Image (spheres, grey):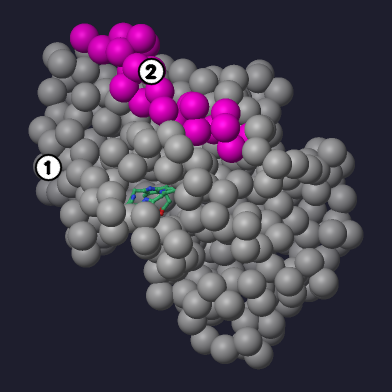
């Protein structure tokens, strides 16, 4: 059993596993080198050999406990034939959403369009660098993908004014997303993903009364589906207020917390394994401060099953030496 599996399944608390969101990314010079020559991000995600290589880059440098596949949550809208592109210094931009067109897509079309993602997972999970470690697959939560598909760009602080205007459309898209996200999870698992993380980056934008319809019910369906494949599932509902209610209803195997969450409060309220929390900006300071902040989380969760990670993705400005220091610090704790 890997360290992560011992933590999730046996609830061991002695050795903290560590992996980092966006561990393969722009803070690594070897990634930037590949990226410079591959300006189309979607195409890069669909290049099986390069996306496998990028996935493994951080494992060559650091003693991480998992590889997370280099892909993006927006590969699902892309697979549903919505145009997706990534603009430098702006983020993702999606094309017009056409329900009639989406309704025409079947499972075969969808899988064909993003097939290299599954091949990359297969090759990563068979690589020696992942021996004794886990390969993590992921999806965007239905709500967060709905946000991108309707809003057509990151909402930053708020959604477009007429976001909720077409209730019929919103609910149809949610149902379609659920179907294709299950397929996407199943194909990742069939190709070697041993854990699934569900990213709900915009969970914090919803009113409390809308949580059941947009988050609790559709996410619970994905969690139950993933568990039925005998694969543990980590949920990251960034910005939600009530973690104990979320865990009680959605029932993930692990809850991932963002950097605005009070870890002591979580320890008090949550019985399941916890992941993440530390502010990625801490890696931009100095080693002394990094040690202090990392040990804060390790101390708080010393008797609780805890997977070390950040409270959001590692920032592009991060010095890889700081990451190296962090991984060693967690391993030596
Ligand atoms: O964590 C990993 O290393 C695995 C790969 C991964 C990426 N995106 C690669 C990526 C994962 C798990 C994601 C998830 C993702 N993608 C989320 C959920 C997590 C979060 O950040 O809240 C979201 C909201 C997206 C959508 C997305 N993709 C945005 C908003 C952006 C632009 C912002 C940015 O950081 O540039 C992306 C691009 C993206 N996805 C990059 C990477 C490495 C940067 C691409 C580049 O310009 O080189």
The answer to which of 67 and 35 lies nearer the viewer is: 35
Left or right: 264 in relation to 201? right
Query: Are the residues at dot 1 and dot 2 in contact (C-beta closer than 8 Å)?
Result: no
Left or right: 223 in relation to 268? left
In this rendering, does residue 249 appear at all?
no
At horizontal 37% and vertical 62% (from top left) the residue drawn is 32
Query: Residue 327 lies in what quarter of the image?
Result: bottom right
Left or right: 207 in relation to 256? left
Query: Residue 278 lies in what quarter of the image?
Result: bottom right
At horizontal 30% and vertical 13% (from top left) the residue drawn is 109
> Is ligand 1 less than 8 Å from the beta carbon at label 2?
no
10 Å crowding of disc 1: few (<14), some (14-19), many (20+): few
Q: Is residue 78 above or below residue 55?
A: above
Q: Which residues are magenta?
A: 104-125
Kindly identify which numbered label has been placed on residue 111.
2
Q: Quadrant of the C terminus?
A: bottom right
The answer to which of 207 and 113 lies nearer the viewer is: 113
The residue that mark 1 highlights is 162
Q: How many marks?
A: 2
Q: Is residue 56 above or below residue 223?
A: below
Q: Residue 17: horizontal and vertical position, in percent?
A: 75, 56
- Mark 1 or 2: in front is 2
Kindly identify which numbered label has been placed on residue 13.
none
């Amino acid at each position: 059993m890997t360290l992560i599996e011992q933590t999730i399944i046996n609830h061991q608390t002695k050795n903290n596993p560590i992996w980092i969101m966006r561990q393969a990314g722009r803070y690594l010079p070897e990634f930037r080198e590949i990226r410079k020559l591959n300006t189309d991000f979607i195409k890069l995600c669909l290049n099986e050999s390069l996306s496998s290589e990028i996935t493994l880059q951080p494992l060559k440098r650091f003693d991480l406990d998992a590889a997370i596949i280099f892909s993006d949550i927006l590969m699902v809208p892309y697979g549903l034939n919505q145009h997706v592109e990534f603009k430098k210094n702006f983020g993702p931009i999606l094309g017009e959403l056409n329900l009639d067109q989406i309704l025409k897509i079947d499972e075969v079309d969808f899988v064909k369009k993003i097939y290299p993602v599954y091949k990359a997972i297969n090759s990563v999970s068979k690589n020696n660098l992942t021996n004794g470690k886990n390969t993590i697959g992921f999806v965007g939560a239905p709500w967060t993908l709905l946000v991108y598909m309707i809003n057509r760009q990151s909402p930053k602080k708020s959604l477009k004014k007429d976001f909720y205007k077409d209730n019929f459309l919103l609910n149809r898209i949610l149902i379609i997303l659920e179907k294709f996200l299950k397929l996407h999870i199943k194909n990742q698992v069939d190709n070697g993903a041993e854990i699934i993380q569900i990213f709900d980056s915009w969970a914090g934008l919803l009113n409390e009364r809308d949580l059941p319809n947009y988050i609790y019910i559709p996410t619970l369906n994905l969690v139950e589906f993933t568990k039925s494949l005998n694969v543990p599932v980590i949920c990251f509902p960034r910005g939600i207020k009530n973690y104990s209610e979320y865990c009680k209803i959605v029932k993930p195997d692990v809850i991932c917390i963002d950097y605005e969450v009070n870890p002591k409060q979580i320890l008090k309220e949550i019985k399941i394994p916890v992941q993440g929390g530390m502010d990625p900006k801490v890696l931009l300071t100095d080693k002394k401060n990094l040690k202090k902040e990392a040990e804060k989380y390790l101390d708080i969760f010393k008797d609780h099953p805890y997977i070390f990670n950040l409270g959001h993705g590692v920032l592009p400005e991060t010095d890889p030496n700081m990451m190296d220091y962090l991984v060693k610090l967690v391993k030596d704790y």
